[in-house]
Image (cartoon, grey):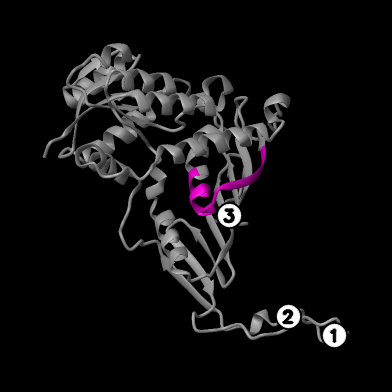
Amino acid sequence: MNTIKTAIVGIGRAGWNMHCDELDKRADKFTITAACDIEPERRQRMAARYGCRTYADIADLIKDGEVELVSIATRSPDHVAHAILALEAGKHVFLEKPIALDYAGALRLRDAATAARGQLYFRHNRRFEPAFTHIRELLASGIIGEVFEVKLRRNSYQRRSDWQTLLACGGGLLNNWGPHIVDHALQFLDAPLADLWSDLKRIAALGDAEDHLKIVLRGANGRVVDMEISGGAALPEPEYIILGERGALICQGDEITLRYLPRDFNLPEEHASAETPGMAYTTGKGGQLPWVNETIGVHPSIPTEMDDIWDHLYAAIREGVPFPVTTAQALEVIRVIELARQGTPFQQTGASPLR
């Protein structure tokens, strides 16, 4: 197979533990030929692992004529500049989240990609999370009827202290987990964004960036997506709660629980009454409906894993197959993140963590 000659820029937690490990499983599609990091020890580790050329500066790496694809896993504030450098050198670029720290940066990326010979691809790998894929299949089947509200949660309690907690380094959960879950939210919204409410707080992290956020989006179709990401939540919630007109589902880990009305059951035609009710305590007939209760494992009809995004990347570069994450979708994620940040006084007040 005609492998794609790949360079990884940034050999940290994402570059070393994610990009390298995922590419190792696809040696028939990608060959790591170069790497770049400011830390000599990390360059040495890459050279020992792959026998690849190493560079301390991306400006030198992009002069490497053998490199076709530059996978960028540097710190968040560097993503736009590094991607544009590689694009201007004629390389394809695979860009980690967040693709930019603001919408203006995202637009600069779009314009640079439009003018470049290479293509820009976005690493929204949680599009291929098995639970997300399976739930989307269930909703498309109509099993719970028309969806009117979606709740997305990624909660834990962490006294985190690395650069991802510092505003000066582009830290905070809105830039870290935010792009993944905002992308999910927009996919579930399934309509243009009509309005948004947000609130950001700092609860447990040791830096000055937010570690608890709530964003509520309403689509032009009336659907609401309520998303919460927290490093200050001591008890978890289900990662997905989907409410439909004929049922609902929740998902936690690898298990989906459904409650829905059979497809062949039609709700009887009834009317509300203003008459005085009887003495028995009752408010309706919901308990008399023929609910189906079901618990299933997470098994989408076409198995997916988050690192499948590399296979889509190969197909896009070598076979011309459209990449599943479009530029417009990636830019909309950053626009929503910017709106969410503007919608809260957190950045101005600098809320203090609990001690």
Mark number, residue 277: 1
Judged from this view, the residue extending furthest toward the right is: 276
Q: Nearer the viewer, residue 71 or 63?
A: 63
Quarter placement of the C terminus: top right
Which residue does the numbered mark 3 point to in the structure image?
151
Q: CA distance from mark 1 to mark 2?
A: 11 Å
Instruction: Check disc 2 and report its element: helix, strand or loop.
Output: loop
First reached walking from the N terminus: tag 3 or tag 2: 3
Can residue 197 be found in the magenta stretch? yes
Q: Amino acid at mark 2?
A: Gly
Can residue 230 be found in the magenta stretch? no
What residue appears at the point 45 percent right and 60 percent down from the top-left corner? 135
Q: Residues within 10 Å of mark 1 (few under 14, many from 20)?
A: few
Which residue does the numbered mark 2 point to in the structure image?
284
Q: CA distance from mark 1 to mark 3?
A: 35 Å
Where, by quadrant of the figure, is residue 72 drawn? top left
Q: Residues within 10 Å of mark 2 (few under 14, many from 20)?
A: few
Give the vertical position of 73 relative to 144 (above or below).
above
Judged from this view, the residue extending furthest toward the left is: 1
Part of the protein shown in magenta = 183-199
Q: Residues within 10 Å of mark 3 (few under 14, many from 20)?
A: many
Q: CB atoms at circles 3 and 2 under 8 Å apart?
A: no
Q: Position of residue 200 (x, y in %)?
A: 66, 36
Q: Position of residue 121 (x, y in %)?
A: 35, 34
